Image (spheres, rainbow, N blue to C red):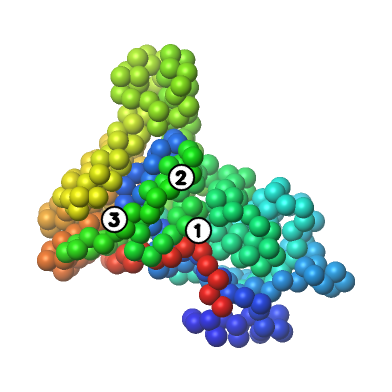
């Protein structure tokens, strides 16, 4: 699908041409998992897969459709008609994201105006690549730009995150939406999730490739243990805070503080916090190693993250652990579960010289074991949300 084709589809549905085309990407994360809602650091980058939309402002036309949003999803081949005054969320799950973004805009600006939109995506769903953040960011960016609402990109990221919290039910951190909006080609983003201060870290590991292997176990964050992980972290931080009032998030805690609070928290909360405190440090160590082009250390930290996500945070599954073992077997420099967990992809940092043997071997082994062919995605670190037509 190219821009011209998208315009034609738009015209077929709404009889006119769109005003503009926007796109926003999914993301990878090199290291720093489940640290964002603990006020810690993450190291994501935007990818070359995303949500693309063609949109037309209708909100200036007071008589006709000022109060209406008409959205057509090309992937689901469904139309959703929403009135801006409508109180209940639309029925289609995908339309809830659009509804949520619009409602969150309304909390920040005076009046949201209507629009017609057609969109499609090429971020694999349920693979941990943040297709939902791409959707939220594409709509937030497009509305803000098209109607000149003047919100900052950080505020747009918060709109996407609040959409997840209030209309989808996932109490996620800010990483995915931030990466989708702030992504920069060839760069990772070292983001402090408390202050939202961030630096771009050029990522061009000469002699290595970043590749994702998709277990094709659907990762599903709604009504699932993701929110419970967050509650555990908050309970552990609250227990530590009794002795150390300066601890706002687990990011501020250390292992000695956690040990002091051990008797006051559940064994489960303890191991969750143990993972997070270790992960915050691992990310900082990996960043130091990156600056020195020391990819062996980065890779070792990735393996440590996987072990922690599997044994302490318990967000892995047998398929992802198998893929991680495969990476070791084929001499991959670093490998781990990426994103929220419970399925989705592993991210692998692999020497170019070992790439072909790893992909062929890991795919064949996985297929032999689980009778499913895993998907392979080469990572291309790309730009964030933008207008493309
Ligand atoms: C999901 C959430 C993010 C983050 C990751 C885990 O992708 O949306 O906010 O918590 O899981 O690092």
* Residue pointed to by mark 2: 197
Q: Nearer the viewer, residue 259 or 79?
A: 259
Left or right: where 348 falls relative to 170: left
What crowding class fits label 3: few (fewer than 14 Cα within 10 Å), some (14-19), or many (20 or more)?
Answer: many
How far apart marks 1 and 2 lie (CA) works out to 14 Å
Visible residue check, residue 125: no
* Residue pointed to by mark 3: 347
Contact check, label 1 and label 2, Cβ < 8 Å:
no
Left or right: where 61 falls relative to 338: right
Q: Nearer the viewer, residue 266 or 134?
A: 134
Q: Secondary structure at mark 3?
A: strand
Q: Nearer the viewer, residue 270 or 189?
A: 189
* Residue pointed to by mark 1: 181
Mark 2 vs mark 3: give the one in front: 2
Chain-order first, disc 3 or disc 1: 1
- Ligand 1 within 8 Å, label 1 CB: no
What crowding class fits label 1: few (fewer than 14 Cα within 10 Å), some (14-19), or many (20 or more)?
Answer: many
Mark 1 vs mark 2: give the one in front: 2
Chain-order first, disc 2 or disc 3: 2
Q: Secondary structure at mark 2?
A: loop
Vertical comparison of 282 with 77: above or below = above
Task: Tell me where residue 179 appears, x and y as whole percent.
Answer: 45, 55
Mark 3 vs mark 1: give the one in front: 1
Rendered residue at 16%/64% (across/down) = 207
Left or right: where 335 falls relative to 50: left
Vertical comparison of 350 with 266: above or below = below
Visible residue check, residue 353: yes
Task: Tell me where residue 124 appears, x and y as whole percent.
Answer: 42, 64
Vertical comparison of 2 with 218: above or below = below
Q: Secondary structure at mark 1?
A: helix
Q: Residue furthest right?
A: 63
């Amino acid at each position: 699908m190219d821009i011209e084709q998208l315009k034609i589809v738009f015209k077929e549905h709404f009889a006119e041409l769109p005003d503009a085309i926007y796109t926003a990407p999914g993301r990878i994360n090199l290291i720093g998992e489940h640290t964002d809602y603990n006020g810690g650091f993450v190291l994501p980058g935007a990818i070359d897969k995303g949500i693309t939309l063609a949109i037309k402002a209708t909100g200036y036309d007071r008589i006709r459709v000022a109060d209406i949003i008409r959205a057509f999803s090309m992937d689901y081949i469904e139309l959703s008609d929403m009135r801006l005054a409508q109180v209940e969320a639309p029925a289609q799950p995908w339309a809830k994201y659009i509804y949520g973004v619009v409602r969150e805009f309304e909390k920040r600006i005076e009046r949201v105006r209507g629009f017609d939109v057609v969109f499609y995506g090429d971020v694999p769903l349920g693979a941990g690549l943040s297709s939902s953040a791409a959707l939220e960011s594409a709509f937030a960016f497009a509305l803000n730009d098209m109607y000149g609402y003047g919100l900052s990109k950080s505020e747009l990221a918060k709109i996407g995150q609040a959409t997840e919290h209030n209309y989808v039910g996932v109490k996620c951190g800010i990483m995915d939406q931030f990466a989708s909006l702030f992504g920069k080609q060839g760069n990772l983003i070292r983001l402090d999730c408390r202050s939202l201060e961030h630096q771009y870290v050029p990522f061009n590991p000469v002699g290595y490739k970043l590749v994702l292997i998709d277990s094709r176990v659907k990762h599903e964050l709604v009504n699932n243990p993701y929110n419970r992980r967050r509650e555990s972290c908050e309970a552990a931080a609250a227990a530590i805070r009794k002795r150390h009032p300066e601890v706002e998030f687990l990011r501020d805690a250390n292992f000695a503080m956690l040990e002091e609070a051990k008797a006051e928290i559940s064994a489960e909360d303890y191991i969750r916090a143990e993972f997070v405190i270790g992960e915050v440090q691992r990310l900082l160590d990996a960043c130091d190693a990156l600056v020195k082009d020391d990819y062996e250390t980065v890779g070792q930290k990735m393996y440590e993250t996987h072990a922690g996500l599997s044994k302490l945070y318990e967000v892995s599954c047998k398929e992802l652990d198998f893929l991680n073992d495969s990476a070791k077997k084929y001499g991959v420099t670093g490998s781990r579960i990426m994103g929220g967990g419970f399925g989705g992809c592993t991210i692998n940092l692999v020497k170019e010289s070992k790439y072909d043997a790893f992909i062929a071997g890991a795919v064949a082994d996985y297929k032999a074991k689980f009778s499913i062919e895993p998907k392979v995605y080469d990572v291309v670190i790309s730009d964030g949300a933008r207008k493309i037509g």
